[in-house]
């Protein structure tokens, strides 16, 4: 049990920025879970207590429904507490703000396989679901290798989507706007800009769509070519059904300390 004093200290840390920590990705049977748990310093992410917390959270998420506020759920291993209590207790014990930033769970079907991949000691976590057209092909070793290779590729190349159809129209429109402005600034003829931008957008989509990207382990083939080759080997159509990629701290605005300004502010009071 965490002392009341410790819990009070944890509450005081609630407004701090937690941008470090680690990503965890694990398989529990045919269910994969990937989570990002943040702390204030990268040192804490190597703490045994932090790692134990992550293991407990992943095990809980693998067993439960992720709808709604997962932190408000009764903790699967001890229903006398909620999942969120684990983070409050960890914050009080470890001495830093510890938060569950995001999470995702995939469960394989009779015609799919889920695979997780962790890169750089928790810097990037990837989860992939690869599907096949025949149930008997779901257990093929080549499909597992394919899922591992695709997960590694996603970690390295960070695609936006599986195919161009999945990239939101507003993202494409924004890119067109940027490219049009750049071409105007570089002195391209106005009547040529639309055609130039069309070509650049095709390149943008190819660079950011998983199936169109050159396969990281063999750039002479695209990921779509790899899927076809594996499908031919196992006698079934192979597709990437979905994927998720968590990169530690991505999108979090980290607070930087201006020590000179802090010292100057303190000196004014003396």
Image (cartoon, rainbow, N blue to C red):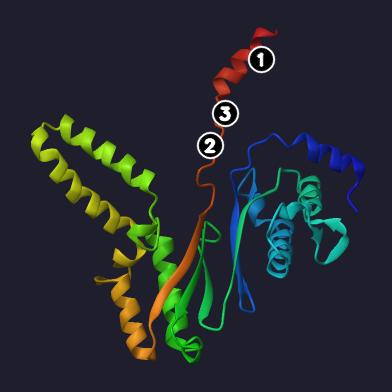
Q: Which is nearer the N-term, disc 1 or disc 3?
A: 3
Q: Where is residue 33 in the image (x, y as percent from the top left)?
A: 61, 66
What's the residue at 72%, 70% (across, down)? 63
Q: Quadrant of residue 193?
A: top left
Mark 3 packing: few (<14 Cα in 10 Å), some, or many (20+)?
few
Residue 188 in view: no
Q: Identify the residue position indicated by label 3 in the image.
A: 257
Mark 1 packing: few (<14 Cα in 10 Å), some, or many (20+)?
few
Q: Where is residue 231 in the image (x, y as percent from the top left)?
A: 36, 84
Q: Nearer the viewer, residue 66 or 150?
A: 66
Along the horizontal axis of the image, is 202 left or right of 125?
left
Disc 2, SS: loop
Disc 3, SS: loop
Along the horizontal axis of the image, is 21 left or right of 59?
left
Mark on residue 266?
A: 1
Q: Do the residues labelled 2 and 3 touch (CB within 8 Å)?
A: no
Mark on residue 253?
A: 2
Q: Which of labels 2 and 1 is toward the front?
A: 2
Mark 2 packing: few (<14 Cα in 10 Å), some, or many (20+)?
few
């Amino acid at each position: 049990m965490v002392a009341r004093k410790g819990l009070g200290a944890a509450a005081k840390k609630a407004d701090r920025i937690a941008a470090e920590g680690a990503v965890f990705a694990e398989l529990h049977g045919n269910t994969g879970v990937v989570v990002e748990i943040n702390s204030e310093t990268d040192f804490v992410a190597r703490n045994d207590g932090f790692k134990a917390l992550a293991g407990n959270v992943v095990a809980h998420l693998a067993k439960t429904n992720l709808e709604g506020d997962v932190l408000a759920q009764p903790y699967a291993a001890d229903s006398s507490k909620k999942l969120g209590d684990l983070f409050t207790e960890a914050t009080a014990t470890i001495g830093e703000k510890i938060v569950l930033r995001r999470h995702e769970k995939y469960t394989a079907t009779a015609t799919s396989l889920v695979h997780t991949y962790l890169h750089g000691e928790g810097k990037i976590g990837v989860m992939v679901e690869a599907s096949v057209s025949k149930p008997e092909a779901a257990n093929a070793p080549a499909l597992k290798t394919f899922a591992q290779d695709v997960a590694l590729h996603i970690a390295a190349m960070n695609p936006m989507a599986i195919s161009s159809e999945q990239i939101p129209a507003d993202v494409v429109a924004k890119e067109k706007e940027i490219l049009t402005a750049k071409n105007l600034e570089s002195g391209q003829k106005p009547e040529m800009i639309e055609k130039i931008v069309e070509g650049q957008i095709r390149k943008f989509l190819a660079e950011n769509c998983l199936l169109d990207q050159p396969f990281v382990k063999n750039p002479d083939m695209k990921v779509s070519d790899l899927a076809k080759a594996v499908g031919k080997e196992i006698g079934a159509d192979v597709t990437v059904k979905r994927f998720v990629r968590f990169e530690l701290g991505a999108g979090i605005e980290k607070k930087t300390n201006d020590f000179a300004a802090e010292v100057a502010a303190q000196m004014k009071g003396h």
